[in-house]
Amino acid sequence: AECKQDLSSDILLVARRDLPAGAEITISYGDQCQEQLLFTFGFALPGGFTDGVSTPLPLMPRLGSEEEQLRAVLCGLLASAQDSNGGAGRSALVARLKWMPGADQEVDCSELFAAANIHKMEVAELRKVAAEAAKQDLRLPNFIFEGVVGDEPAAMLRQILQEWTQDLAEWDLASERFRRRANPALDQLLAYRAECLALARAALRRLEGQAKNSIGGDDGNL
């Protein structure tokens, strides 16, 4: 069966084929990520949040100046790139964190790094990135995914991750009294928050590690 809207704006559940009386009716929730299933429908599928979690870092800036419009275009390309890499159903409004496939607790910060770089680039740098993307079938250059470029995006990202980690940790302690209650939906919500906390801490460690490498002269990204 599927949901349809009729001319009176009523939502109808319509069978796709003839069904005998008493038959079970099933519907598809569509192409949803685990986050959307949890917060829209109140459940998540088994297997954990392997498709990542949303961070507090927004992708889309307010439109106005040429600089803001360039940021919006590049962030749009970033969201499209992640969708094509298996991120369908995710929110295109914020950057996401996830674990690297097959790696033991190694975090994939590529989208977070790219978003931070785009948010803090000067207009001349934004133009160069846009020009490079235009030459590569609208694919953003690799360097913006590999690490934060400069002090400003590093400082912004560090503050976001520290505040997010603190909020998640405080909520985790406050929720201890709920853990004794038998509630599957609540258990999934607590598991999601725990996954966010683990990813945020891992991202913060990676950011700090990159800063130490930069001071040592290894990569020069910060």
Image (cartoon, rainbow, N blue to C red):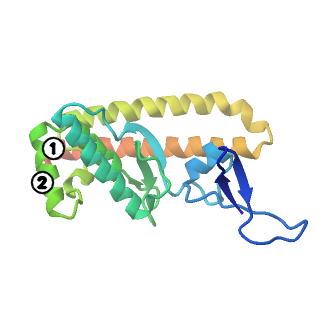
> x, y percentage for residue 129?
15, 50
Give the alpha-carbon distance from disc 2 to disc 1, as whole Å.
Answer: 9 Å
Q: Residues within 10 Å of mark 1 (few under 14, many from 20)?
A: many
Q: Nearer the viewer, residue 162 or 74?
A: 74
> x, y percentage for residue 15?
74, 64
Q: Is residue 187 visible?
A: yes
Q: Nearer the viewer, residue 24 or 169?
A: 24
* Residue under the point 18% across and 57% down: 133
Picture disc at residue 93 = none
Q: For mark 1, what is the residue?
A: 126
Picture disc at residue 131 = 2
Q: Left or right: where does residue 204 sit relative to residue 14?
A: left
Q: Which amino acid is tagged 1?
A: Leu
Q: Left or right: where does residue 20 sit relative to residue 90?
A: right
Point out the image quarter for the N terminus: bottom right
Q: Is residue 136 above or below residue 18?
A: above
* Residue under the point 37% across and 57% down: 82
* Residue under the point 51% across and 41% down: 197
Point out the image quarter for the C terminus: top left
> x, y percentage for residue 168?
53, 33
**Residue 65, quarter of picture:** top left
Which type of secondary structure does the marked residue at label 1 adopt? helix
